[in-house]
Amino acid sequence: MENQEPTREAVNTLTGATVLEFGATWCGYCKAAQPTITSQLSHFPNVRHIKIEDGKGRRLGRSFHVKLWPTLIFLKDGVELKRLVRDIDAGELMSGLALITA
């Protein structure tokens, strides 16, 4: 997880396909989801994947209204197109990746 989170303004100006992954290193749900996330992302090497350590006082997570972890936000050119929260299903993850790379 990144300790230095990007600003919302920086995220809004990203070009191309990006997945923001909000979570915490100690989160059991986050740890359990890692094999699925890693596996599916390996099929999309051109997708930018930004892991963000979230928690109290973290502005980026609050700006996206993140309440549960892990939360994956699928962006295309800085615009949110899909979101997955907590139970990360491989099919839904693949669907989100296909959406932002189309």
Image (cartoon, rainbow, N blue to C red):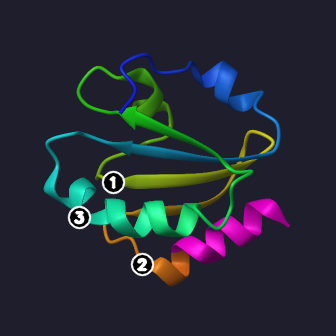
N-terminal of the pair, mark 2 or mark 3, is 3
Q: Are marks 2 and 3 in contact (CB under 8 Å)?
A: no
Q: Nearer the viewer, residue 76 or 65?
A: 76
**Residue bearing the label numbered 3:** 32
Q: Residues within 10 Å of mark 1 (few under 14, many from 20)?
A: many
Q: Position of residue 60 (x, y in %)?
A: 47, 27
**Residue bearing the label numbered 2:** 89
Q: Callout 3, which amino acid?
A: Ala
Drawn side of residue 18 relative to residue 5, left or right: right
The kind of secondary structure element at disc 2 is loop
**Residue bearing the label numbered 1:** 70
The residue sitting at 14% across, 42% down in the picture is 26
- State the CA–CA distance, disc 3 to disc 1: 10 Å
Q: Quadrant of the N terminus?
A: top left
The residue sitting at 81% across, 44% down in the picture is 16
The residue sitting at 68% across, 61% down in the picture is 44
Q: Nearer the viewer, residue 42 or 62?
A: 42
The kind of secondary structure element at disc 1 is loop
Drawn side of residue 38 relative to residue 74, left or right: left
> Which residues are the magenta region?
93-102
